[in-house]
Image: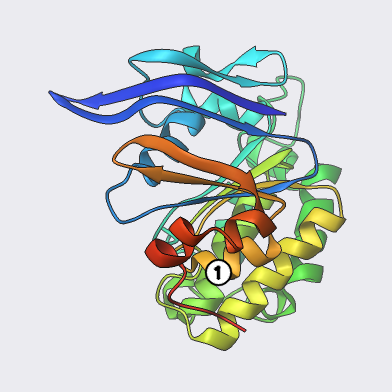
């Protein structure tokens, strides 16, 4: 589904990614692990179009993502949950979720309801809202609350729910466990396994490498902007190099 081929990204003179190649097959959870500053977030930003690549290519099915704007990548099926959640604190939970659907399709010029009225009555928006509320019942309970009043775990659920509102084919997640209590981390990871079972493909960047590899099908290790190790998740869990460098912290 997703193919990254020899991608390099620079920030001025600094080479953040150097000839990175990565593959995510349909229906997989693939995890990307590495130290802070290794290039994990930069790679997700390159895939989603937030940063431009200097060389190489990124393919989503038959479309080259590295040549299109970020809002178009959403329409092609990329859902992105950024580090730090980045919800709109002054808006309601429901409005935050609804914003996640705006890139699904363009305005219908024949609508007599006006754009907002037409948009909110689209079957896909309502169906996606019900799906998110099924996955996160607490969000339905708090749909009229301001997002800024939610706990950290609830805001992470909201960020994931907002990405799901665009009906993505693949979900990119950047450090979803950051700042969460261990019991909430377990719930988030269980949710990712459930989403895979329901047909969603996932590329996961996660600080807890052990927990990520336990739920993933395959994994990549990135160091100083280069992919240095790759393989089946079970193999990486037993790799001495990976264990010594990244597997000190565990969520049982």
Residue 100 drawn at (x, y percent)? 60, 47
Q: Front-most of 174 and 25?
A: 25
Q: Can residue 89 be seen in the rendering of this structure? A: no
Residue 61 drawn at (x, y percent)? 72, 20
Q: Residue furthest front?
A: 240
The quarter of the picture where residue 119 lies is top right
Q: Can residue 9 be seen in the rendering of this structure? A: yes
For the image, the number of numbered tags is 1
Residue 81 drawn at (x, y percent)? 52, 52
Q: Front-most of 7 and 171?
A: 7
Q: Front-most of 72 and 39?
A: 39
Q: Residue at x 63, y 44 (%)?
A: 231
Residue 6 drawn at (x, y percent)? 46, 19
Q: Residue at x 44, y 36 (%)?
A: 227
Q: Residue at x 70, y 19 (%)?
A: 109
Crowd tier of the residue under label 1, counting other residues whose Cα lies within 10 Å: few below 14, some 14–19, many 20 or above? many
Secondary structure of residue under mark 1: helix
Vertical order, 47 against 241 (above or below): above
The quarter of the picture where residue 101 lies is top right
Q: Residue furthest left?
A: 13
Quarter of the image where the C terminus is located: bottom right
How did the renderer colour the structure?
rainbow
Vertical order, 19 against 162 (above or below): above
Quarter of the image where the N terminus is located: top right
> Pointer 1: what residue?
210
């Amino acid at each position: 589904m997703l193919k990254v081929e020899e991608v390099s990204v620079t920030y001025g003179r600094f080479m953040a990614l150097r000839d990175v190649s990565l593959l995510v097959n349909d229906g997989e959870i693939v995890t990307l692990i590495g130290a802070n500053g290794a290039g994990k977030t930069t790679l997700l930003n390159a895939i989603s179009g937030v940063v431009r690549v200097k060389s190489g290519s990124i393919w989503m099915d038959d479309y080259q993502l590295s040549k299109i704007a970020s809002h178009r990548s959403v329409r092609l099926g990329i859902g992105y949950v950024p580090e730090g959640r980045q919800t709109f604190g002054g808006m309601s939970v429901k409005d935050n979720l609804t914003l996640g659907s705006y890139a699904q399709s363009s305005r219908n010029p024949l609508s007599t309801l006006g754009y907002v009225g037409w948009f909110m009555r689209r079957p896909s928006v309502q169906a996606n809202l019900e799906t998110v509320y099924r996955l996160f019942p607490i969000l339905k309970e708090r749909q009229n609350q301001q997002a800024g009043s939610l706990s950290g775990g609830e805001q992470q659920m909201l960020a994931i729910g907002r990405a799901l509102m665009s009906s993505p084919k693949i979900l990119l997640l950047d450090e979803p466990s950051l700042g969460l209590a261990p019991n909430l981390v377990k719930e988030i990871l269980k949710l990712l396994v459930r989403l895979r079972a329901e047909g969603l493909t996932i590329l996961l960047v996660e600080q807890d490498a052990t927990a990520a590899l336990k739920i993933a099908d395959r994994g990549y290790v990135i160091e100083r902007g280069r992919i240095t190790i790759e393989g089946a998740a079970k193999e990486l869990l037993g790799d001495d190099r990976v264990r010594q460098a990244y597997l000190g912290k565990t969520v049982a």
